[in-house]
Amino acid sequence: MRAIAFAAVVATLGASGARACEASKRGFDDLRPGLSGAEVEKIVGCAGQTVAETGDDGRKTVILQWPGNGGPDSNLTVTLENDRLVEKAQSRLKQADGAGGQ
């Protein structure tokens, strides 16, 4: 479901000529353990792409990823267990451009 939402955002923004949603260092810094998946997506500014999903013994683990604002090798990755943030990682994120951006 998140992958579909992410694809819809990319398609919509791509068609309008606007830049697709990109994660920033500021958004990464605002992420805290225990946030829900919806809260993470609100902070980042769009839905992440599901890159892995597993579930067993009543525990569901989902790994989401966003492209970053620091170039082609830039990204933000989070791990959710039972829809709660347990781990985050980033590569080459920059602070957001402009005031008020994440």
Image (tube, grey):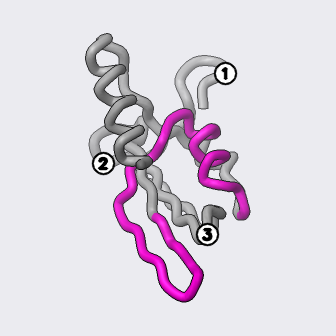
SS assignment at label 3 = loop
- Amino acid type at circle 1 is Gly
* Residue at 28% from the left image edge and 21% from the top image edge: 14
The correct choice, above or below, for 84 with respect to 73 in the image is: below
Q: Is residue 72 shown left or right of residue 69?
A: left
Q: Which mark is residue 82?
A: 3
> Mark 2 touching mark 3, by CB under 8 A?
no
Q: Which mark is residue 73?
A: 2
Of residues 71 and 38, which is closer to you in this image?
38
Identify the mark nearer the N-term, 2 or 1.
Answer: 2
Dot 1 lies on which element?
A: loop
Which callout, 3 or 1, points at the residue further toward the start of the chain?
3
Decide if residue 26 is in sight here.
no
Q: Which residues are magenta?
A: 34-62
Residue 17: where, in percent of width, then height? 30, 12
Residue 75, percent from left and from top:
40, 49
* Residue at left offset 39%, top offset 39%: 6
Which residue is disc 1 drawn over? Answer: 100
As shown in the figure, which amino acid type bears the numbered disc 2?
A: Asp
For marks 2 and 1, give the CA distance.
Answer: 24 Å
